[in-house]
Image (cartoon, helix red, strand yellow):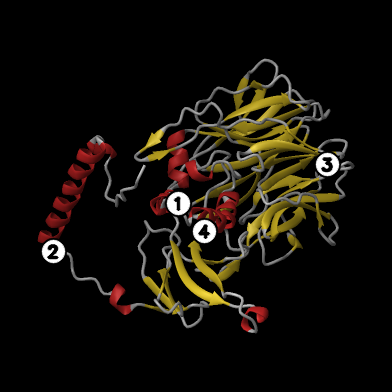
Amino acid sequence: MLNEHDHVATEARRSDADGIGGAVRLAQETASFIASSRQSDRAGMARFVGACSVGLALVLSLQSSAAGQNSDQPRTEVLGIAFASFAPLNTDIFIADANGNNARPLIATPDLDYNPSFSPDGRWVVFTSTRNGSADLFRVPAAGGTAERLTDHAAFDDQGVLSPDGHRLAFVSSRNGQADIWILELASGVLRNLTNHPGGDFRPAWSPDGRQIAFSSDRESSQPMFGFTVLHSTEIYVVQADGTNLRRVTSRHAAAGSPSWSSDGRLLVYYEAEIADVQRIRSAARQRGSTQLATVNVETGEHQTLTRGPGEKWSPRWVEHDRIGYVTRDPDSDGGVAFIQGAAGARGEMRNPGWSPDGRRMVFHRDVGTDWPPVRPWASRDASFRLQRTGVFPSYSPEGDRLVVNDERAGILHNRILMMNGDGSSRSISQAATREPPVTNAARMLRSSEVSRRRRIARSIWGLSSRSCTQGRYVPSRR
């Protein structure tokens, strides 16, 4: 799962910063992509799957409608696709005291609900949900009740925030084929693309007077390289609400995201991190990294670092005019709520926090799912494809009634082979996969020699330096 940085991996960067969006959108678009690729280059599909770092398993089944069974109509061919996702299992929205205590579910569903924010009057909570298949924006009374849908589109809509007057909704959407900031007029339903740039734009934030919107973007990314991976540096930008006078207000050449305005509109608080820390945090091994909180004066560009020391610090928000809240996280714990001034709050996983205008309540989302690996149906855009989310590197038996997956959440981790029925029942660890012969010195030397041989082959094929070559598989493709 990707963390709360506003830059993301190359293939998913036009979705949301939390990483949920990249996985959700990938799952929803896989069927449509494969459908359009049936008569095209099969290697192209393989390249797509490989680049997104997910395993897909296909099982062919024939499903007939009642009419088809009683007539000469041809039977409908349905492809079942099992896939692995980086998304959480089941995120719910919670509301709590300002320090995170007394948290309770605001709205609980088996779907992904995430990225909540309060309305300016504190009466509503806007959030993203996949309850209808695609990621769309909803709002629910802060006191609890029925959710009301605000956007309805097959694209990915996320990170919604209401303007100070409550009449407009700014959000991130991929409906134009890229991650742009859009504005929805709630009364009329009129939509307009505010940023319209091929780069990824994330985390919009309204200024107190409603005239400007701050956001993070990788549009001027330095594109730092780590091995074969291209990361994306991000900066903070400010634009008028009518789309004019776009300007960059930070120049960190690293990672900067989740901007939040001070009550007087002079300062933006945000998180920042060096690219090396970003790489450690986003790695499957979940290594230690550090982020800091900083402010920038939107007029003068004056920068001030607010925090020091190790550890992850995310999602800063001005709770009151002189108080900034944020959440912490590290590999050894779920972290919790903290404040620049005052005592720390409740501990536990709390993502994308938001505080009510009076500073007395807090909303956030967390993953409440525990059943790993999942085996559950997933919404498909194409009726000829049936999607099922599973663990990593799924593979069906020829009959389609048995499934094997890795038992861990990433291929780089120490995995065992988990065997189960096609519906996820009767799970067991393959005993053959758990028995490993003792590693002798000769075996270690052989492995080292094999790695060196693969690196030499990679250099001869790709013209890469020895430092860039890592053990892996290369799949030839037609161009």
Q: Which residue is mark 3?
A: 357
**Residue 172 visible in this rendered orientation of the protein:** yes
Residue occupying image coordinates x 59% and y 69%: 377
Callout 2 secondary element: loop
Quarter containing the C terminus: top left
Tag of residue 85: 4
Tell me where residue 444 sits by quadrant: bottom left
Q: Position of residue 54 (x, y in %)?
A: 45, 56
**Residue 374 visible in this rendered orientation of the protein:** no
Q: Which residue is mark 2?
A: 440
Callout 3 secondary element: loop
Residue type, label 2? Thr
Q: Which mark is in front, 2 or 4?
A: 4
Tell me where residue 385 sits by quadrant: bottom right
CA separation, marks 2 and 1?
48 Å
Residue occupying image coordinates x 76% and y 56%: 95
Callout 4 secondary element: loop
CA separation, marks 3 and 4?
36 Å
Q: Is residue 30 above or below residue 402?
A: above
CA separation, marks 4 and 1?
25 Å
Q: Which mark is in front, 2 or 1?
A: 1
Q: Which residue is mark 1?
A: 40
